Image: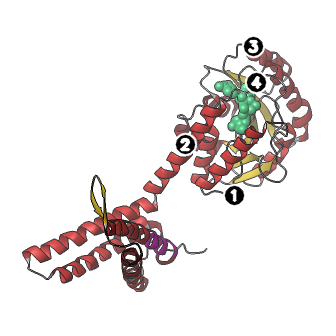
Amino acid sequence: MKVVIVTPTYNEKGNIDRLIPTLENEIFPQIKNHDMNILVADDNSPDGTADEVRKLMEKYKNIDINSGEKQGLGAAYIRGMTYAVEHMGAEVMFEMDADLQHDPQKIPEFLKKIDEGCDMVIGNRYSDGGSIPKNWPFMRKVFSVVANLFVRTVFMKLSVHDWTGGYRALKKEVFLKEKEELTNYKGYIFQISFLHKAIRDGFKIGEVPFHFSDRNLGRSKIAPLGYITEVFKFVISTRIREVIMGKFGKFLVVGGFGFIINFAVLKILSDSFGWNHSWANLTGAALAIFSNYNLNNIWTFGERKVSVLSSYLFKMLQFYATSAFGVIFIQTGTIFLGDRFIGEGQFSFILPIKYYYVYFVIGTGLLLIWNFTIYNKIIWRKKPH
Ligand code: GDD
Ligand code: MN
């Protein structure tokens, strides 16, 4: 396959001078089954990195350069990868820093994973066989480790260890699929958002552990505090959006609609038909549950929809039973326990608030968790394949 190592540069004259010959003379000769090339994505570096690259281009024929305005690391990658695909025919691309912090000896291992069917291979500094520089100051190590742990846990993707790193290999299909959405991520946050979208879209991810060495020449362009804030904001806002737009959000909408049905039926049967309130409410609740069941079945859990009549009826029965259990034991139970052990009273917050309102809100919160868990894990559980 045609492989292009895309390396972004901003003032890396001294480093590119060493990286390119290493790749050409030591690494590429080891790789027999791929056509290896290099693209330098330079942002008109004032130190003359581009002139250095042009000199090397005379010596090595598999190198190209793509220059542009400085807009950040992510922007340079998007521009460079687009160029690699459109002008160099890249089928596989590497992300690799120019400052020799990414051990070039690992390139064959990345390619092996691609050959084995991975779509995107991530260099990993945080598990066996990987590391961050020993001589980094303590706080820098802590930030590096904690930031990655944070991203892994919030995204609930513990199996991927290194989210922020910039040593990767990927098939061009991954880039082309995510490119449009990535244009907003011009800086270092590009790395997390790219990986996140690739996982979301079901691309197969592999990992290669490596030792991240320290920079010898030049300086890092990252602004640590700004970067950490950006990571935090990106991860939290992305996760909140996913939860709201995902199953849980739909479940809340369906439940809200059920609540309206319940109340409307209660009111109509009571006020217009003179029903006793309790019967009117029971009827309303029964209809609301019916609506909830069907809307969850076709919408919230649409891709696990039950349609065979016998299991549709059986699951509806389950749904009524677990809903009733939740209302009686969890929601009502919370109010009961609150009254019993904390007491009845009221406090003032803008308006007077009776304690039992609070018990109701907590009970309803617990009820929602109970219902969602039962629906997800029992009624519409994923069929094992
Ligand atoms: N073209 C271009 N434009 N290149 C840039 C820019 C830019 O705005 N900013 C940085 N680069 C280049 C650098 O010249 C270097 O080759 C590479 O991108 C990495 O930049 P560094 O400034 O050395 O980053 P770092 O070592 O602090 O960060 C590394 O580790 C981070 C995770 O800890 C990189 O691998 C990051 O991608 C990674 O997120
Ligand atoms: Mn660096």
Highlighted magenta segment, given as a residue range:
369-377
Distance from disc 3 to disc 4, alpha carbons, whole Å, reads 16 Å
Residue 370 part of the magenta-drawn span: yes
Q: Residues within 10 Å of mark 1 (few under 14, many from 20)?
A: few
Q: Amino acid at mark 2?
A: Phe
Q: Residue at x 65, y 34 (%)?
A: 85
Q: Is residue 144 magenta?
A: no
Question: Between tags 1 and 4, which lies in front?
Answer: 4
Earlier in the chain: of badge 3 and badge 2, it is 3
Q: Above or below — where is 3 with respect to 99?
A: below
Q: Quadrant of residue 54?
A: top right
- 194 vs 371, nearest the viewer: 371
Residue on which disc 2 sits: 234
Cβ atoms under marks 3 and 2 closer than 8 Å = no
Decide: few, some or many residues near mark 3? Use Cα within 10 Å; few <14, some 14-19, many ≥20: some
Splitting the image into four quadrants, where does ligand 1 fall? Answer: top right
Residue 219: numbered disc? 4
Q: Secondary structure at mark 3?
A: loop
Identify the residue position indicated by label 3 in the image.
Answer: 48
Real-space CA distance between mark 1 and mark 4, rounded to the nearest whole angstrom: 32 Å
Q: Is residue 301 left or right of residue 115?
A: left
* Relative to 301, 55 lies left or right: right
In the image, 48 versus 192, the foreground residue is 192
Q: Position of residue 93 (x, y in %)?
A: 71, 38
